Image: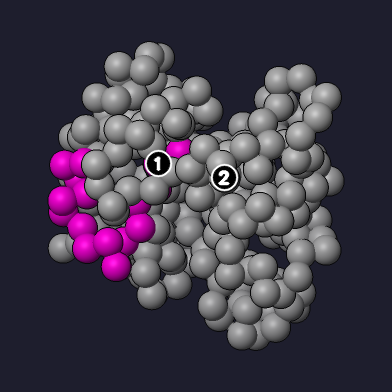
Amino acid sequence: MKKHFFANWKMNPRTVVEAENLLKMYHEGAGEIDGKKIGLIILPPFVFLPGLIEKNKSNKIEFGAQNCFWEKEGAFTGEISPYALKNAGANYVLLGHSERRRILGENNEVINKKVKAALKERLRVILCVGESSLSAEQADKGYLEIKEQLSAALAGVKKPDLKDIFVAYEPAWAISTVPGAQAESLDDVLSSILYLRKLLGEMYSRDVAQKAKIIYGGSVSSQNAAEYFSQDGIDGALVGGASLNGSEVIKMLKEIVK
Ligand code: PGA
């Protein structure tokens, strides 16, 4: 099955010129991959999206946003609609990221509304779920948290729409900018992904669970990317910090196609 590499630039870089220079490095990286086997998706800040889409020279690179609102248009100051994103050339939207949950107070109910609104506009959704702390995981509470996040975010989402969803399993404590963070061990990632498939099986069907696209995020770099990408059960990665370094991106793409 095709694997996907999502580059979550977060609130980086600082300027249009820097964003365009980074895109140039992605063009070089895209040369390393077979577009039929690896999807390469950049999720830049909103303001850079249209400009980067216009400057994009590779048919192997697609774009998405890091958030959206749940209404199509109207009096919602400061928000961006999925309709406008699609119209601007985005094909994907990242929803439920732990930084938005933690810093901006996004809850499962809000995330659910966004997921449904994005799917309605035929945006593909990268839905982040993951335990909020290492202590929760160690106390075996991590699975409870994941279950709650997944079932709430997908409430009312119909089976055929699952083909447009990527579930990103991303334990918040493994994100590289969190003090003391390290990537989750391959075994633990595999068990959590298996658990997510089991949940999807219970919520939908075995077929959905088997076909579901589930990726991993949390301190992925050129040191470990190949390890995750080589596993049948892992359909790709959501990469934050390392996706801001052009040479690192090229290295990762080289590693995962080896
Ligand atoms: P990281 O971030 O790769 O820097 O750990 C991943 C993410 O937050 O999506």
Q: Residue shown at 61%/57% (left/top)?
A: 122
Determine whether 176 is above or below 77 in the image: below
- On residue 228, the disc is none
Q: Is residue 69 visible?
A: yes
Q: Is residue 245 visible?
A: no
Position in image of residue 234 (x %, y %): 43, 66
Q: Could you classify mark 1 by the number of other residues whose Cα lies within 10 Å: few (under 14), some (14-19), or many (20 or more)?
A: many
The amino acid beneath tag 1 is Ile
How much space separates mark 1 and mark 2, taking CA atoms? 15 Å
Determine whether 122 is above or below 222 in the image: below
> Dot 1 lies on which element?
strand
Q: Earlier in the sequence, mark 1 or mark 2?
A: 1
Position in image of residue 114 (x %, y %): 73, 45
* Disc number lying in front (1 or 2): 2
Q: From the image, tell me which residue sits under label 2.
A: 86
Q: Residue shown at 39%/27% (left/top)?
A: 51
Q: Nearer the viewer, residue 190 or 257?
A: 257
Determine whether 164 is above or below 217 in the image: below
Q: Residue furthest bottom?
A: 206
Q: Residue shown at 76%/64% (left/top)?
A: 157
Position in image of residue 257 (x %, y %): 20, 62
Q: Is residue 139 left or right of residue 243?
A: right
Position in image of residue 28 (x %, y %): 16, 42
Range shown magenta: 27-43
Picture quadrant of residue 7: top left
Q: Where is the C terminus found, in terms of image quarters?
A: bottom left
Picture quadrant of residue 56: top left
Q: From the image, tell me which residue sits under label 1.
A: 42
Q: Residue shown at 61%/73% (left/top)?
A: 197
The amino acid beneath tag 2 is Lys
Indicate whether residue 138 is drawn in magenta: no
